[in-house]
Image: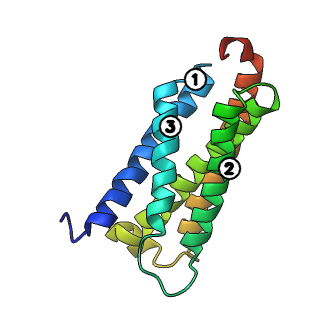
């Protein structure tokens, strides 16, 4: 075990990091008007598995993390359908970009929560999620993802003939 992690925690964290890293590669591909099929598959599969493994941890009540996992699985289902069944044609292109970016945002949202919870320096400056620095980090991240999503949708629309 690494730093007291159970094997489930370790797998969950690794899947999450793979999802985040491959998600950023996919996002950059959207800006460059490239599908990056391999990284897209890695992103979607690892992000689905991150959400699924999150439900395997023991719990006694419904937690905010369960809500995030449910929303993530819903948007991932739509993203997968838009990408593979909708073939990125017409409205499915924007639908895919928006839902993929929401899934990536949710992963980053949880990463920020975990960083503020687990990293001693961050926990010291923002001991609770109600702390202004925690809220600022999450707010800036949300605004950044909204802007990046708008840019990605525009790029895919402008260059849709290159993606088919």
The answer to whether 64 appears left or right of 5 in the picture is right
Q: CA distance from mark 2 to mark 1?
A: 24 Å
Give the residue pinned by disc 3: 24
Q: Position of residue 108 (x, y in %)?
A: 52, 53
SS state under label 1: loop
Between residues 148 and 127, which one lies in front from this camera angle? 148
Question: Against 60, is 113 above or below?
Answer: above
SS state under label 2: helix
* Dot placed on the residue nearer the N-terminal end, 2 or 1: 1
Rendered residue at 65%/33% (across/down): 83
Between residues 34 and 125, which one lies in front from this camera angle? 34
Q: Quadrant of residue 158?
A: top right
| Label 3 packing within 10 angstroms: few (<14), some (14-19), many (20+) | some
Give the residue pinned by disc 2: 143
Between residues 89 and 115, which one lies in front from this camera angle? 89
Q: CA distance from mark 3 to mark 2?
A: 16 Å
Q: Position of residue 20 (x, y in %)?
A: 46, 45
Q: Give me the disc on residue 35.
A: 1
Q: Residue most toward the right?
A: 91
| Label 2 packing within 10 angstroms: few (<14), some (14-19), many (20+) | few
| Label 1 packing within 10 angstroms: few (<14), some (14-19), many (20+) | many
SS state under label 3: helix
Question: Against 156, is 128 above or below?
Answer: below
Residue 149 visible, this orientation: no
Residue 122 visible, this orientation: yes
* Dot placed on the residue nearer the N-terminal end, 3 or 2: 3
Q: Quadrant of residue 127?
A: bottom left
Kindly indicate whether the residue at mark 1 contacts the one at mark 2 (C-beta within 8 angstroms): no
Kindly indicate whether the residue at mark 3 contacts the one at mark 1 (C-beta within 8 angstroms): no
Q: Residue most toward the bottom?
A: 60
């Amino acid at each position: 075990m690494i730093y007291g992690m159970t094997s489930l925690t370790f797998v969950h964290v690794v899947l999450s990091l793979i999802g985040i890293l491959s998600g950023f590669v996919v996002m950059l591909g959207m800006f460059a008007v490239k599908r990056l099929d391999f990284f897209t598959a890695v992103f979607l599969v690892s992000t689905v598995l991150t959400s699924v493994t999150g439900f395997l941890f023991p719990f006694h009540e419904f937690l905010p993390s369960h809500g995030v996992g449910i929303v993530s699985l819903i948007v991932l289902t739509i993203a997968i359908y838009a990408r593979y069944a909708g073939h990125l044609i017409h409205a499915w292109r924007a639908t895919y970009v928006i839902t993929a970016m929401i899934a990536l945002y949710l992963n980053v949202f949880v990463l920020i929560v975990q960083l503020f919870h687990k990293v001693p320096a961050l926990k010291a400056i923002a001991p609770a999620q109600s702390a202004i620095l925690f809220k600022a980090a999450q707010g800036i991240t949300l605004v950044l993802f909204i802007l990046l999503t708008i840019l990605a949708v525009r790029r895919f629309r402008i260059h849709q003939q290159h993606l088919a």
